[in-house]
Amino acid sequence: MNNAEELKKLVKEKYGEIALQSKDQNEASCCGATGCGTVDYAIFADNYSDLQGYNPDADLGLGCGVPTEFAQIKKGDTVIDLGSGAGNDCFVARALVGEEGKVIGVDMTEAMIAKARVNADKLGFNNVEFRQGEIEDLPIAANRADVVISNCVLNLVPDKQKAFAETFRVLKPGGHFSISDVVLVGELPEGLVKASEMYAGCVSGAIQKEDYLQLIRNTGFEHVVVQKEKAIQVPDEILKDYLSEEGIKAFRASNTGIYSITVYGAKPADSACCQPGAGCC
């Protein structure tokens, strides 16, 4: 499966199912939303429970980092969360921007948007909103955000170059992003690359770490730096659905690494509203 629209449909279906489950259900299942035979979507997740603004109803255990920890969010900032899910990172960001700030979450999955809006209503927030849309075509005007965050989502986007171009467009000149994502060092076995479940589980949709960072630089961002990095270990009980026993041994013995990284990049203060030549100004 490599057609962009088919991949988006897959992600919508998988994450639509996950939206109907709790964090405990996702973590109790060996394989996320659909039972054994698919990827455990919670194996990358970090613990949010001690963070100000944390709301358990919004935490589905789907992240691979805590981008707000490194995003340098200030009171009064406007923050955009790409792939906002049930609102977990948005509500943490809201605690940082305060009453005078604004948080906008964007997600393409209708069930996630519905769940996030219910959570926001329960909390009584009037400066957090959720918009349905795709990261490659954000439903947000140019020069809107002081900070963009995202948590384990861009690896699911087929056109990552366009996703970063949209990130550049919606940031104010001088604004910046902090994004947690999954990247690779070395080549995945063919069985993992071809598995659609591994794509939705954030593994086979990942690209090489250096390619990822260069893509960000090529978009026009400056001061690009990896703020945090950790190795991800996919359990054998998941790998055995895609690889033979010998294949698992070979994969373990190879130099291939799956990593969660949190990356920072800034839009130049003297930049135009968007990428040169993009025609969006």
Image (cartoon, rainbow, N blue to C red):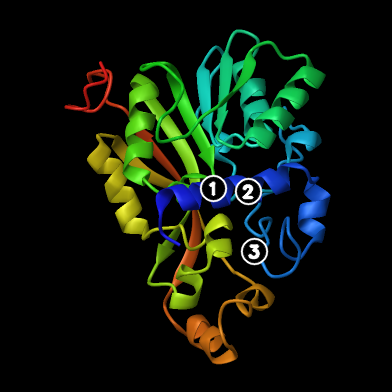
Q: Secondary structure at mark 2?
A: helix
Q: Quadrant of the C terminus?
A: top left
Tell me where residue 233 appears, x and y as whole percent: 59, 69
Depicted 167 relative to depicted 28: above or below = above
Q: Earlier in the sequence, mark 3 or mark 2?
A: 2
Depicted 69 relative to depicted 210: above or below = above
Residue 13, disc:
2
**Residue depicted at x 65% and y 30%:** 113
- Horizontal side of residue 240 vs 179, given as left or right: right
Q: Secondary structure at mark 1?
A: helix
Of circles 1 and 3, the one toward us is 1
Q: Which residue is mark 3?
A: 39
**Residue depicted at x 67% and y 44%:** 16
Spatial separation of the CA atoms under disc 3 and disc 2: 14 Å
**Residue depicted at x 59% and y 89%:** 245
Residue at the left extreme? 277
Tell me where residue 221 appears, x and y as whole percent: 29, 35
